[in-house]
Amino acid sequence: MASMEHEEKRQFQRMALSSQLHFRRVGDSQLFKGTTMDLSATGMRFITSEVLNSGEFLQIVINSQNAQVAPLVAEGHVLRAVALTDDEDRYEISLTFTELR
């Protein structure tokens, strides 16, 4: 019988975060919008209407709601892009950070 306890295997805990973000493919100037789902020290998940593929390299900017806090600027690779079943025009994106600024 399997244990009822769930052991967290992630090295860094995720924090739920619902905030607007902007992103672009590295090497491209076109900006797209998204909404964060969660964030950790090594990556994040967000929802967007833009179709992305695993392996794409993105630059992400998340502005703070507090003017005294600098925006989070990060680059990373798309690990997974899953179409949401409740809406054909929305995708859940999992991204691993390669650089945080």
Image (tube, grey):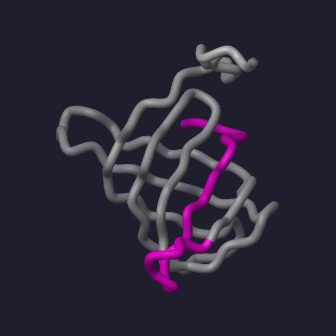
Q: Is residue 63 left or right of residue 51?
A: left
Q: Is residue 99 magenta?
A: yes
Residue at horizontal 39%, vertical 60%?
A: 35
Find residue 17 and report its image quarter.
Answer: top left
Please state which of residues 31 and 88 is positioned toward the viewer in this rendering.
88
User: Residue lying farthest front?
Assistant: 1
Residue at horizontal 50%, vertical 30%?
A: 14
x and y, in percent, of residue 2 in the image: 73, 20
Please state which of residues 101 and 6 is positioned toward the viewer in this rendering.
6
x and y, in percent, of residue 85 in the image: 53, 75
Residue at horizontal 32%, vertical 51%?
A: 19
Residue at horizontal 67%, vertical 23%?
A: 10
Instruction: Say if 18 sits above or below 54 in the image.
Output: above
Q: Is residue 53 magenta?
A: no
Q: How many marks?
A: 0
x and y, in percent, of residue 90 in the image: 49, 76
User: Residue lying farthest right?
Assistant: 55
**Looking at the rendering, in which quadrant would you find the C terminus?**
top right
Find residue 12 and report its image quarter.
Answer: top right
Q: Is residue 18 left or right of residue 75?
A: left
Residue segment shown in magenta: 83-101
